[in-house]
Image (spheres, helix red, strand yellow):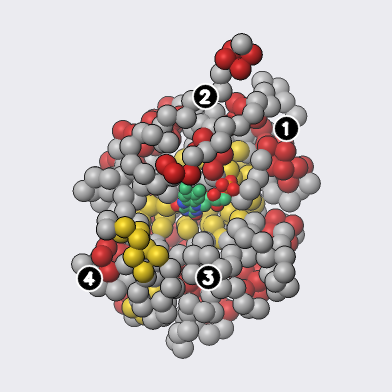
Amino acid sequence: MKTDQPLLQSFKLGATTLKNRVVMAPMTRSRADNPENAPTDMHVEYYTQRASAGLIITEGSQVSPQAVGYIHTPGIHSAAQVAGWKKVVDAVHAEDGKIFIQLWHVGRMSHPDFHNGDKPLAPSAVNPIAKAFTSEGFKNTVEPKAMTLEDIQQTQEDFVTAAKNAMEAGFDGVEIHSSNGYLFHQFFNKNSNVRTDNYGGSIENKARFFFETLDKVKAVMPENKIGVRLNPSLNGVFGIDATEETIPTFDYIVERLNNYDLAYLHLSEPFTDVSDIDFLETEIAKHYRPKYHGNLMINANFDQESGNAVIKEGNADLVAYGKLYISNPDLVERFAIKAPTAEWDQDTFYTQGEKGYTDYPKYNVQAQEA
Ligand SMILES: Cc1cc2nc3c(=O)[nH]c(=O)nc-3n(C[C@H](O)[C@H](O)[C@H](O)COP(=O)(O)O)c2cc1C
């Protein structure tokens, strides 16, 4: 269908071409409720239903058993998980879709219940004072273990292995989850990183763990198949309290990412209202577009109109939709005919089974006109 909507134009992403600029944002859906935490046939169906997206980014997938922080999330560290993901990838490719996997380590947003009683890993022993969702329900987070240099190296190796596994499963690329208060973000933030070694203190030091990991990952896979996700103005959620150093830290990271030939940089607009905090940015795409010279993906609270507008204004190349993709598997087709979008059911975001997962219908023109 011929259209002048910016969202529906194709886009060259590294070595591949996306059929449109509508991206399915990474979303944890907690359906890997099997002992292996492997993707199942239900995951195959869920992602295939959404294959008309220009790009799918999978739910966060733990890079190791230590990286997990929520029940029933899939991993990308075991043979069974790779085999499960391969089925997902093959099915999405058969529908002419493209799919990246999000590589995830939650750091301190975990709980000893996931680690045989051991403390979760983090840059420093600072409790995020949050809730972890374990098999026994919500529990208070604990003071984590400050990572030793050995832990740092091992975790970086886990990302490398996960990236290799992703390539083996046939993914078009990986997204490093350095966003939303998880491990990398914990290193970036002054309140969660009080280290006095090379990984703490200065902005450069706080970014070191991330850039070292990125360098190691790019040694085992093409750089232009790696995406990076950041949420610069995150504040008051996921254990992150922003400080005056926050935006300078992200400015530094984003500018330094220009030295890489990444698939994309994925940014989120603020998750909460930060308009009364003068040291935070309220308009992330506008602030970072001039600073970043590669492909820029923007997310959070976009609809069809604002998505088309942000591309048209030149502030982003791609728009990632989260919740709209939960309830509209055919989001692209709906955009094409400007059909209304369906509401999502928050109660089934993280439940198990097909309800609220694979049972959202496609838009039915005839039913609507009848
Ligand atoms: C159910 C749910 C699960 C999510 N899981 C992840 C995740 O695994 N990784 C991630 O980076 N963001 C995750 N997010 C955040 C989304 O990717 C996105 O940033 C957020 O929903 C805002 O975009 P939206 O307004 O288009 O929904 C999740 C959001 C929702 C609603």
Assign a secondary structure to mark 3: loop
Residue 357 locus on image (x, y percent): 41, 36
Compared with 347, 227 (above or below) is below
Q: How far is the residue under mark 4 from the one under mark 3?
A: 24 Å
Dot 1 surroundings within 10 Å: few (below 14), some, or many (20 or more)? some
Residue 313 locus on image (x, y percent): 79, 46
Residue 20 locus on image (x, y percent): 62, 34
Upstream in sequence: badge 2 or badge 4: 4
Task: Give the side of residue 81 with respect to residue 366, left or right.
Answer: left
- Residue drawn at 63 percent across, 48 percent down: 301
- Residue drawn at 31 percent across, 45 percent down: 32
Quarter of the figure with the C terminus: top right
Q: In this figure, which residue is indicated by the disc labeled 2?
A: 362
Compared with 324, 144 (above or below) is below
Q: In this figure, which residue is indicated by the disc labeled 1?
A: 5
The label nearer to you, 1 versus 3, is 3
Upstream in sequence: badge 2 or badge 3: 3
Assign a secondary structure to mark 4: loop
Type of the residue with mark 1: Gln
Type of the residue with mark 3: Ile
Q: Dots 2 and 1: beta carbons under 8 Å?
A: no
Upstream in sequence: badge 4 or badge 3: 4
Q: Is mark 4 within 8 Å of ligand 1?
A: no
Q: Is mark 3 within 8 Å of ligand 1?
A: no
